[in-house]
Image: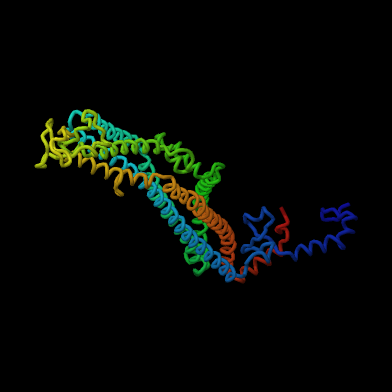
Amino acid sequence: MDSGNGSRPPAPILHSLRAPIITPLFRRFDRLPRCCHDTFYRRFGCMCCSSAKGEGCLRNGHPKGHPLLARGVLLVSFCLVIGLNVGIDNVRLEVSELLLKVSELLDGVSDMMSDLNDYALDMNVTAGKISSYASALDCADDYSDQTESISDASGTIAEYAVLISDSIGTLPRELGKMSDNIAENGDTYVNYAGLALAALGVLYAVLGLLGTLCFEGKQNPVRCATGWLATTNAFGVLMLIIIALLLAGELTAGIVLGDFCAADAGPLNALASVMESQVDDDEAVGMMSFYATCQGTNPLGAYLDTQQEAVTNMTDILDSYKDLFIHTNMCCDSAYDTDNIDPDTVADSCTFYSASNPNACTTNSVCDYSGGTNNGGCVAAGGCLNASYTGIVNEINYLALDDDGPLVGFFGEFECAEINPKLAKLINEIMCDSLVESLWWMVAVHISVLILMYIVMCLSSFARQAIYESTLDKDQQAEDVKENYANPGESCYKF
């Protein structure tokens, strides 16, 4: 049935429910704050939003009407960002110092290997001098076996010196390259990249502080605060991308270094495996593996033992035949068999004479032995050149006995107990302890900066809105609120 104006009367049941239920319910909704109009947030139930046309649904969750509070929150947040970026610089300095220590220790091991190689080359040169002096001894033919033995021994020393040098091979150079790469590339990455990132973080915070402290007008170009804060957020997006990429690299390095240090066989054995995969010189790798673990036999030990035997052989000949080598002839007791001269007993039965001795006997004639008269026979001795003999003795003393000589120096440095502590300190203390700890501290600081910047960017968006709205005309805001209440159909509860 029509009511006369073309509209139908309400159903009896709805009419009966309107007064007690529906009307109070809509009135209750009318008293709730209205949502923003024409904003992105409307489609999400209008949480924490406001505009010139109305206030957000969560009035207490938004700093609307409190611009000083918003600026204070931003001030504290950006100061925290600056503090964390200063922390990045401190960690950067610590990592840089540790990389410098790694480089110095590698240089130290490289220098020791270079010293060993220099000693080996010096052995070769000294052995060559001994061989030259032996060839120039010009002894009698009866002593050719002895002079040849000296030449052969010096040749053995020279040969094994070359083998030692070949075993060391390119190891000093490879260690030097590793040290240079760490010193140059590591320093470049940690210092320049770390400083650049810290500088960008501080720049981000400074831009934010400018926006926080700057005056905010009603319209451009005097909307300084919101303009700077918007610029800060745009720059912050770039910073988040940079920090994320940096974190990816740091985490990758940390995982690789952690796996290296946590190897089942131990980091020193892992170092030997790395050297094996990076260096093509098998002998150098074997030697480095020995010095890293002190297990097995030193590859250089057999070479040095052979050289030491050769030196002993030469010194025995020189000591035994000294009188025979350096004298021209000798007067021997007639009872002594001069056809079968024994170097160990000849001195007991013969008197030696040099060419310059005026009392020297005449070879192949009778002589006066030990105060007698014509009771001995004068026979030829070695008659070697004294200068050559003296040269051999001096070179052997330098080679094997002198504290500054190559063999003594080599034996003093080639033991595993000399080199292994440096490697152990490099791997166990610096790389697998201090460096890993500093690296993860850097990761933690960068993650903190990343999270803090993300939170600050979110806060900045809402604070920027509050700062902007604080400059709007109060009367216009009141008219907008009245308009919202006068048109309840525009409520945020209508989707």
Q: How is the image coloured?
A: rainbow
Q: In x, y percent, where is residue 377?
A: 16, 33
> Is 344 on the left-hand or right-hand side of 223?
left
Q: Residue at x 25, y 38 (%)?
A: 318
Q: Residue at x 39, y 52 (%)?
A: 104
Q: Position of residue 248 (x, y in %)?
A: 52, 47
Q: Image height check: is 387 above or below 451?
A: above
Residue 367, by quadrant, is top left
Nearer the observer, 17 or 413: 413
Q: Residue at x 42, y 54 (%)?
A: 101
- Asked if residue 37 lies left or right of residue 86, the reply is right
* 207 versus 329 height, above or below: below
Q: Would you say 475 lies left or right of 169 here? A: right
Indicate the position of residue 144 as horizontal and vertical percent values: 22, 29
Depth check: give the residue in front, 417 or 240: 417
Residue 237 shows in the view: no
> Which of the two residues, 254 or 351, is positioned nearer the viewer here?
351
